[in-house]
Image (cartoon, rainbow, N blue to C red):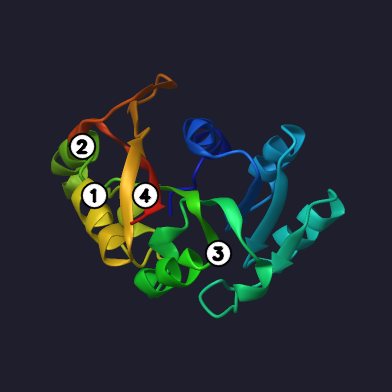
Amino acid sequence: MEKEKPIELEVRQKFALPRIKAGRVLDVGCSDGSLLLKLKSMGMETVGIEIDPNLARKCVEKGLNVLDGDVEKMDTAALGAFDSIVMTDVIEHFTDPLSVLKKLSANLKPDGVFVLTTPNVDWLFWHLAYAILRPFGWKPHAWINPEHKQFYNKRTLAKLLDDAGYRIVGDNSIGKIPKTGIHFKSPTGILSCNIVVAARKK
């Protein structure tokens, strides 16, 4: 299976960062805590949730407030209210994403912002490359990753958020020129390799 390059996660965090509201921030699926460290350095109060116990432990060793657990099974009420909740390429891993979004709504302040990123299955490059390379067994990483239980484009992600009681208020979706390292903000669906949106409660 194709491995994701760490630089790609850094890029998504960079595009998500401007949409995060200062204050108290919850990072769901915080991985190694790199985003939490950035937010903490900016003076924000941070809390993380990480399902991988080894990553969670490393975050704690870095001095971060990170809980080891599965947010789908966790009672998040005790965590309190947040100005921002962030999920960087996490929503596609959930069995029941609607329930998670509804549950976390109780943790988001009335004027808070929910920032999500996820691979965009409508990205034109993937479809063109797949059409050419399919005879050789190639498939896009987002489609073959066995940990991905859901697949989104801008329309289906917007529908999910709407069903969960949110409305999209900002779009920092990412386009890129493959093999060049060049990334750019791309509101056009087929040119976005990753969706990056900010949402508020209705």
**Secondary element at tag 4:** helix
Q: Is residue 157 left or right of residue 20?
A: left
Question: Which x, y percent locates residue 153?
Answer: 23, 49
Q: Nearer the viewer, mark 4 or mark 3?
A: 3
Q: Nearer the viewer, residue 8 or 194?
A: 194
Q: Identify residue type, mark 3.
A: Asn
In the image, residue 39 above or below residue 166: above
User: Which circle's residue, 4 or 1, is located before the other in the chain?
Assistant: 4
Residue at label 3? 107
Measure the alpha-carbon separation of dots 1 and 2.
7 Å
Specify few, some or many for label 1: CA neighbours under 10 Å numbering under 14, 14-19, or 20 or more.
Answer: some
Q: Nearer the viewer, residue 179 or 63?
A: 63
Residue at label 1? 153
Q: Nearer the viewer, mark 3 or mark 2?
A: 3
Measure the alpha-carbon separation of dots 3 and 2.
30 Å
Question: Which x, y percent locates residue 103?
Answer: 47, 72
Measure the alpha-carbon separation of dots 4 and 3.
32 Å
Q: Identify residue type, mark 2.
A: Gly
Residue, x 79% and y 52% (percent of image)? Answer: 64
Measure the alpha-carbon separation of dots 4 and 1.
15 Å
| Quadrant in the picture for the N terminus | bottom left
Residue at label 4? 141
Specify few, some or many for label 2: CA neighbours under 10 Å numbering under 14, 14-19, or 20 or more.
Answer: many
Q: Identify residue type, mark 4.
A: His
Q: Is residue 169 left or right of residue 41?
A: left
Specify few, some or many for label 4: CA neighbours under 10 Å numbering under 14, 14-19, or 20 or more.
Answer: some
Image marks 1 and 2: residues in contact by CB distance under 8 Å: yes
Residue at label 2? 189
- Mark yes or no: residue 194 visible: no
User: Which circle's residue, 3 or 2, is located before the other in the chain?
Assistant: 3
User: Which circle's residue, 1 or 2, is located before the other in the chain?
Assistant: 1
